Image (cartoon, rainbow, N blue to C red):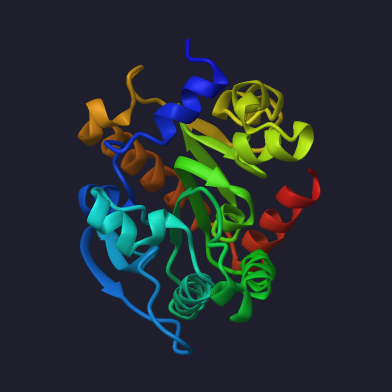
Amino acid sequence: MLTPWEKVQVARMAQRPTALYYIKHIFENFIELHGDRNFRDDPAIVGGIATLNGMPVTVIGQEKGSNITEKLFRSFGSTHPEGFRKALRLMKQAEKFNRPIVCFVDTQGAFCGIGAEERGQGQAIAQNLQEMMGLTVPVISVVLGEGGSGGALAVAVANEVYMLEHAVYSILSPEGFATILWKDSTRAQEAAKMMKMTAQDLLSMQIIDGILPEPAEGAHTDPKGVAKTIGTLLQERLTELKTMTGKQISQARYERFRKF
């Protein structure tokens, strides 16, 4: 069994499948939509409309990129404020047309740069949290690799949240936690254990709703199998959630987070 720090290393592996891989292998007829209608298109967020075995859905994913060129282009998955605003625009569009929403979480955290702060990074994240809470369509979020801080939570205010077996989800990176607590980033391994950031820890605390299995070596050793596992879960859960009324869906989401 992997230690928390080993899981962090697996979650960060360059070979680990990204959101675009899962979008391609789970959904059909994906059409990517761009831009926040305010500043620009943030490539760290990929979103659009697709079908899941004939069911229309809106898909939003935090995309890290699969090689160094893509990673630089996509800021290693660190979302800018316009990325969060693009995601929210697509969510509100989904609500208008009564489409369920699927979010793939995979980021070390929101982009921390002067420009992002000047364009309202904190406000963009806060608005997503507020607006997602009231959405009247089902929302399911899946943590694929890293789920870091508000950058992850801004697309994870969902009716149900699931994690891949070796994914991690926390308020901060272990290095950042160790730096703040002990002024020593080299104690990240110790911090990872203290932070209770693994899928197993979070399920035991009822913060997530389930764990999706992946090979012991990581999802990259059987990406198609992991994609099939995710796809099966999404179809089952969305089919059930769609039987609820819009008011019931938003109320259930609100109560889920209030009980924390």
Kindly identify the residue that appears in the image at 21 percent across and 53 percent down. 24
Kindly identify the residue that appears in the image at 62 percent across and 74 percent down. 117
Residue 233 picture location, percent across and down:
40, 40
Kindly identify the residue that appears in the image at 52 percent across and 58 percent down. 139
The quarter of the picture where residue 222 lies is: top left
The answer to which of 209 and 68 lies nearer the viewer is: 68
The answer to which of 95 and 127 lies nearer the viewer is: 127
Residue 54 picture location, percent across and down:
25, 59
- Asked if residue 175 is positioned above or below residue 94 in the image, the reply reads above
Task: Name the side, left or right, on which 1 lies relative to 120.
Answer: left
Residue 53 picture location, percent across and down:
25, 53
Residue 127 picture location, percent across and down:
66, 73
The quarter of the picture where residue 20 lies is: bottom left
Task: Name the side, left or right, on which 252 lies relative to 44.
Answer: right
User: Which residue lies most toward the top here?
Assistant: 1
The tally of labels here is 0
State which quarter of the image contains the C terminus: top right
User: Which residue lies most toward the bottom here?
Assistant: 38
Residue 202 at least partly seen: yes
- Asked if residue 54 is positioned above or below residue 201 in the image, the reply reads below
Kindly identify the residue that appears in the image at 27 percent across and 61 percent down. 51
Residue 212 at least partly seen: no
